[in-house]
Image (cartoon, grey):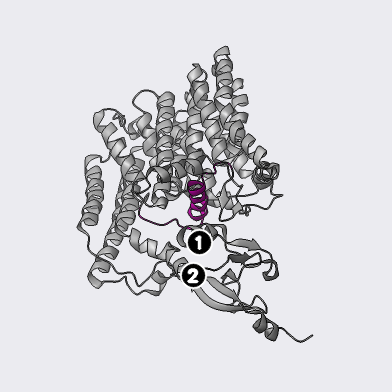
Amino acid sequence: MSVTDTVAPDRLAAGPAIWVGTLLLALAYLLPGLTGHDPWKQDEAYSFGIIYNMATTGDLVVPTLAADPFMEKPPAYYITAAGLVRLFDGYLPAHDAARLASGLYMALAFLFTGLMTRATWGEGRGLIGVILLIATVGLIINGHFMITDTALTAGMAMACYGLLRARLDRWGGFWLGTGAGLAFMSKGLLVPGILGISVVLLVLFRDWRSWTYLKALLVAALAALPWLLIWPTALYLRSPELFHLWFWDNNFGRYLGFSELGPPTVHLFWLQTVPWVTLPVLPLALWSLWSRRQTAWRNPGVRMALVVSVVGWGVLFGSSTARELYTLPLLPLLAVLAAGAVERVPRPVVTFGYWFSAGLFGLLSLIIWAFWVYNIVAGRPPQWFWLSEFLTVDYVGTWDRVVFAIAAGFQLGWAWCLWRWRPPQAAALLAWPVGLTLIWGLLAVLHLPWIEQARSYRGVFTELRAQLPADFNCLADLNMMPLRECERGLLHYVAGIKTEHVDSPAQTRCDYIVTETNLRRRGAEIDIGAGWERIWRGSLPPVRLDLFTLFRRVPTAQAAAAAPAP
């Protein structure tokens, strides 16, 4: 590719207008969907169950789900969210206030990604990294939900910025230690382990082989110490058994596979997942390294990002458990690397990317608007069988001019960006992140109530609570047909019921038992033995595959009569 085939630099990230535009883009990206819906399964539901317990009991040491300790993760995210629940009590529903923690941590991730990008590529380039992070497909799917991985991502971005700056001054050590501590208190030892290996490997390079770096590492150790010691010590003093369960089973056991926690890594999972989760920052990062191959390796920011990325992806691929959201903390590093490619993307690629993004997101936005208009005019969604597999078909659409005005603002903003930044400008690549933001915004503004009706457990658990007398003693769930973690947390929040987990009906003193089964794996007929009668069934629309069944203990005489003769 000749020099004449590349796009001339146009100072994509310079000037007050770009600062304001990036801020507006970040707000348009972050805010929609943070409020206005119940916790959705799976991660949001169990996360909020823990947050709700913390906010109501004030216990910040032992994360608790329903009536049981939940030791998968340290409580930094949960404590932050519980604090927001109390702060906004009376102004926002508890679940909406808690979800603001994700917006807060994603804003921190954007900030330190921008700082990293500026430190790597120079003044005026920090906003490119932020825009590229917004453009990443994997982030928009997981970055808006109530999950601890958002805090983990913020901690990783902060620590990596500190690691890059640590070769220059002690402030780098502060940010490195604080970020590593936040990552530790968000999800355990994995990211601090990645950072620890990277800290050692960077000594191989002259930029980090200095007394300044050593002093910064001492500062980092001091900054990380409170994060690493206060909560684990408090947990150990409260319960050595719970400490062992968290430290050994949920860190080493989960990673190595001997504790059988988390979804196991399946064949080709990462090969199938990485290309779409990292789109478009991974291809741009590779192009950045290739197009700058004569100088990139001498750039300290590139060295740091590459070392941490190689270590991080290697650790991730070696884990016994795998989910696409585990990639979140590594995306800021790819955005930093990709920022070096924006002004070197070949002109034909810029043109193709612009028109592809304009066509794709234009078509998707048209479909989203069409569904909304149909719901308003017809008073219900289209009665299509395939649609009923994902959304309810009894939703009643209503006109709301405020909703219309906000959605129209998203659409007009997208159209203006397409008109303002066109090929051959490098800024034409904005068509992708602005288009992603448009689609997310339209879905959250126009169709959130419809999606909520399909994904909320409020209706089914309100029905379940109505079947129970006011003075019932307790409700149990069975190990052989248990409520999942997310359902136990939401049942506590929606209905005020904490279930007791037991192995068999004979082991419970409760007069009521609830079971959950999947109709694809088990039929609708469920029998938990003599002495119990089924009094209610319910399911979550629209698919209705997860069946909840409520049983009541039969009085002693009836139980004896129903028992088989010896």
Amino acid type, mark 2: Leu
When the figure is inspected, residue 338 is found, relative to residue 435, above or below; the finding is above
Is any atom of residue 465 visible in this view?
Answer: yes
Magenta-highlighted residues:
36-61
When the figure is inspected, residue 167 is found, relative to residue 320, above or below; the finding is above
Rendered residue at 47%/57% (across/down) = 493
> Do labels 2 and 1 touch, CB within 8 Å?
yes
Residue 387 found in image quarter: bottom left
Percent across and percent down for residue 194 are 60, 34
Label 1, secondary structure: give it.
helix
In the visual, does 310 lie left or right of 25? right
**Quadrant, the C terminus:** bottom right
**Quadrant, the N terminus:** top left
Amino acid type, mark 1: Leu
Percent across and percent down for residue 328 are 50, 43
Q: Which residue is mark 1?
A: 491
Label 2, secondary structure: give it.
helix
Pointer 2 or 1: first along the chain: 2
In the visual, does 16 lie left or right of 288? left
Rendered residue at 62%/25% (across/down) = 200
- Any mark on residue 556, and which? none
Q: Which residue is mark 2?
A: 464
Percent across and percent down for residue 85 are 42, 46
When the figure is inspected, residue 271 is found, relative to residue 20, above or below; the finding is below
- Crowding at dot 1, Cα within 10 Å, few <14 / some 14-19 / many 20+, comes out as many
- Crowding at dot 2, Cα within 10 Å, few <14 / some 14-19 / many 20+, comes out as many
State how far apart marks 2 and 1 are (Cα).
9 Å
